[in-house]
């Protein structure tokens, strides 16, 4: 692997706090002055300097994971003048120099290939892989966890999940009985590209006299009802034939079925709740969740102003629509698009018009904050295979990667790629600050126990003809898989207990 030395200058700004005081003795004609010595606050030590001084004498450290141009985790063997690749490469060199490792990548083209590769190594007790990166769901980290192929993380040295380079909602929502099998945060560049957002066509919004959308967001009035009003206002039968098509007419919003999760989370929906003992209960069919789903179904499901490109009714409309998630939007046939940043980062570069970026709308004005959901198919889950023998080394590199990810990858992706290439006005940049305040993960969005998360997606987008729904209403469809879901949750707990026992055994040896 071609290596080149890249250095970075770290600037520490010291705050000088002059503490001077003057006192005058009232009984004396001569003034006296007491001046306190000027003090300087000591700079906080650089985190990696205090994390560990271990060196591993040139050992090969192998990471396996899904990594593609759209969903990156790894880099090429040199800098190529591409922002994300070069930032990953810069981080790699820092890790290799500091810890004396030679980093190697076992790049997989899909989440399922990654899962197969890891499971095979674990079953063969082959310790080639030291870290794994994969999608949270769809046969990714969720499958590795239930197969017992991951190491429990909370008992390992070096890993500090209280720090900002780890996704705090993920850590909070994904711990089961206080234990954690995989994490998310700065260790993966795809973490920053997983955020689900709303895009809008600025030129069309101006032409159609839509209100100032940035102002709606900043005043807390960007709600699902307001979005419904605006997408209905935008729907246009351009050719006047009485039939709406994605390549001739103008829709209010274009989306994929996956966006249903983003809307649901943004509206305050939660598929799981923590129990008193630290476990989980599945509560998708609660009254509050059902109310959110019913509202969303009416606005972005059954509404003709909403076009879901991978809906059963539309899947064969145009091959480009499923290959390019934003084709309907970038070609000028929709006012809004609900999407994940990993798609926007690539496809918006080809859009001729002007676009803006917004958070996904709140449920109503009473909801305090905008909530950004992660697309769980982004390969940003990070864990240690159960077959890894030096778990302390894996944990140290994993922690350092996350810290350097926040230091190196986030500025590259967020400030350069997102601010510089996607957000074409300063207001959009302000919206990104709201979006990236936190990225929310739901336990069941990752594990999809009994396909319950899939039922939610189909119900909200009104794709009622698929086999899982079979024309049923939500209550019936959920009831049909509820026993399967509870059994799947029980299987996960069993797998976690096995992983905990294995981790404790390695730590004791």
Image: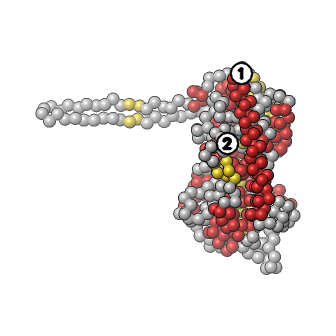
Residue most toward the top?
Answer: 57
Q: Nearer the viewer, residue 277 or 261?
A: 277
Q: Earlier in the sequence, mark 1 or mark 2?
A: 2
x 64%, y 51%: residue: 273
- From the image, tell me which residue sits under label 2: 176
Residue at the image position 43 percent from the left and 32 percent from the top: 41
Number of numbered discs overlaid on the protein picture = 2
Q: Is residue 184 visible?
A: yes
Left or right for 172, reference 113: left
Label placed on residue 509: 1
Image quarter of the N terminus: top right
Q: Is residue 424 above or below residue 397?
A: below
Question: What is the x, y in percent for residue 445?
Answer: 72, 51
| Colour approach in the figure | secondary structure
User: How busy is the neighbourhood of tag 2: few (under 14 within 10 Å), some, or many (20 plus)?
Assistant: many
**Front one among 272 and 197:** 272
- Identified at 74% across, 30% down, the residue is 502
In the displayed structure, would residue 289 be above or below residue 80? below
Q: Name the image quarter holding residue 189.
A: top right
Q: Residue 495 location in percent, x, y?
A: 76, 38
């Amino acid at each position: 692997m071609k290596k080149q030395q890249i250095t970075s200058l770290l600037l520490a700004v010291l705050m000088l706090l002059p503490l001077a005081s003057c006192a005058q003795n009232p009984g004396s004609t001569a003034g006296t002055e007491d001046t306190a010595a000027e003090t300087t606050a000591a700079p906080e030590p650089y985190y990696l300097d205090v994390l560990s001084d271990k060196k591993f004498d040139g050992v090969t450290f192998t990471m396996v994971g899904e990594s593609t141009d759209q969903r990156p985790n790894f880099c090429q063997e040199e800098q190529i003048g591409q922002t994300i690749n070069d930032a990953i490469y810069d981080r790699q060199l820092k890790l290799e120099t500091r810890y004396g490792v030679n980093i190697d990548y076992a790049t997989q083209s899909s989440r399922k290939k990654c899962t197969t590769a890891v499971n095979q190594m674990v079953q063969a007790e082959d310790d080639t892989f030291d870290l794994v990166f994969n999608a949270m769901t769809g046969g990714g980290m969720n499958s590795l966890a239930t197969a017992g192929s991951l190491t429990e993380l909370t008992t390992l040295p070096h890993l500090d999940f209280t720090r900002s380079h780890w996704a705090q909602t993920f850590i909070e929502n994904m711990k089961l009985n206080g234990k954690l099998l995989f994490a998310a945060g700065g260790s993966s560049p795809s973490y920053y590209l997983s955020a689900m957002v709303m895009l809008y066509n600025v030129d069309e919004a101006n032409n159609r006299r839509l209100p100032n959308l940035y102002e709606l967001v900043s005043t807390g009035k960007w709600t699902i009802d307001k979005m419904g009003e605006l997408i209905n206002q935008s729907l246009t039968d351009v050719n006047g034939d009485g039939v709406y098509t994605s390549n001739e007419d103008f829709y209010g919003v274009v989306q994929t079925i996956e966006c249903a999760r983003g809307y649901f989370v943004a509206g305050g929906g939660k598929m799981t709740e923590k129990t008193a003992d630290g476990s989980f209960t599945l509560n998708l069919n609660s009254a509050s969740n059902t109310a959110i789903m019913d509202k969303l179904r009416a606005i972005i499901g059954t509404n003709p102003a909403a076009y879901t490109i991978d809906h059963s009714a539309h899947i064969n409309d145009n091959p480009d629509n499923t290959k390019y998630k934003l084709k309907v939007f970038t070609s000028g046939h929709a006012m809004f698009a609900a999407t994940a940043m990993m798609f926007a980062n690539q496809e918006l570069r080809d859009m001729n018009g002007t676009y803006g970026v917004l958070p996904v709308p709140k449920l109503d004005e009473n909801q305090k904050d905008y909530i950004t959901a992660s697309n769980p198919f982004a390969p940003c889950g990070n864990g240690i295979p159960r077959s890894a023998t030096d778990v302390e080394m894996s944990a140290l590199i994993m922690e350092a990667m996350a810290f350097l990810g926040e230091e190196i990858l986030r500025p590259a992706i967020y400030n350069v790629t997102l601010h510089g290439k996607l957000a074409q006005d300063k207001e959009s940049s302000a919206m990104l600050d709201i979006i990236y305040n936190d990225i929310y993960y739901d336990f069941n969005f990752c594990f999809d126990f009994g396909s319950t998360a899939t039922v939610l997606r189909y119900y909200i987008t009104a794709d009622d003809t698929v086999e899982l729904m079979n024309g049923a209403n939500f209550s019936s469809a959920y009831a049909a898989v509820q026993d399967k879901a509870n059994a799947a949750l029980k299987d996960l707990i069993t797998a976690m207990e096995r992983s905990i026992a294995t981790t404790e055994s390695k730590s004791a040896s």
